Image: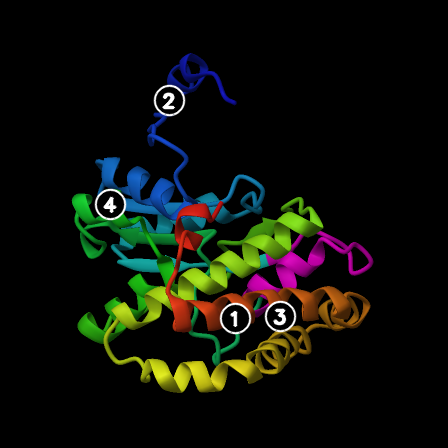
Amino acid sequence: MADPAALDAAGWQLHRCGGQPSILRLWGTAIAASTQRYVVTMDVECPPDKGWWSTLLRELGTGTRVFTGPVAPGWPPSEWMIVGYLVEYAQFHHPHHPSVHEVPGINFACERALLDSNDVLRERGWFKTFTLWRLAREQNIVASRCDEMQVVFRRNLEPGSFLRRRYLHGRCFGACRHQQPGQPPRWACVLFAPVLPVLRCARVWRAAARHADLRLAYWRQLHWVVLSEIAWSWGEFLGYLLGAGDACDRLD
């Protein structure tokens, strides 16, 4: 763990969150404690690439309210850990494809005023997907794309923890989805859930197929892709049927 004194000396501020908080509550606590006009969410294992900082400053200077950039793979196709990139971030490979409307939570900048209140963030945490849904639906705000603002996915994975996290993330998503307006009926989601693994694997393939290195990675790691999307889909199904349980609290 980093030394708080060393962080202070380097100009960083460490915000503490009691108990064993989920990643959602850690994000929420940090955003609630922010004092600047903008917040930026990143991952320590997904460092910024060359040009990231200058692009960020440019967009801040022009007053862009929400913006994001691509995510590049940091693992070769032969390394199984690239599966984390394939299932979560392949659609964000440079250059941006116009069919992609999602935003990577590990490379995202937003005006603080557009996000939830401090109390909500501390209590419930920050769920990027639902935040962006609300901004698009209620305020017609979508993220600008900055191809020069790239980060590199180099996250180390352990098979059991990776599959557990996919299950927890899917269950938390399924349970919380219907807290958002404009969603299909819960019963329809439950009936539709058995085909989710096939649809999710097809979604990963559509993103990977646009790039030669990712096509190779997809076929070399297909068994991991399938296991990952089965884990997510099972969690999402249980989230629709039984609720979150402690899944949201256990996300790391």
- Do labels 4 and 3 touch, CB within 8 Å? no
User: Mark 1 or mark 4: which comes first in sequence?
Assistant: 1
Examine the rendered structure and indicate whether residue 63 appears above or below residue 196.
above
Say which of 62 and 187 sits in front: 187
Say which of 28 and 78 sits in front: 28
User: Mark 3 or mark 1: which comes first in sequence?
Assistant: 1
Q: Secondary structure at mark 4?
A: helix
Region rendered in magenta: 72-93
Mark 4 vs mark 2, foreground winner is 4
Q: Position of residue 210 (x, y in %)?
A: 66, 77
Residue holding disc 4: 123
Instruction: Residue 145: tell me if it is visible.
Output: no
Q: Is 224 left or right of 120, judged from the image as shown?
A: right
Spatial separation of the CA atoms under disc 2 and disc 3? 43 Å
Residue sitting at 50 percent across and 44 percent down?
A: 43
Residue sitting at 25 percent across and 42 percent down?
A: 122
Instruction: Look at label 4 and name its amino acid.
Output: Glu
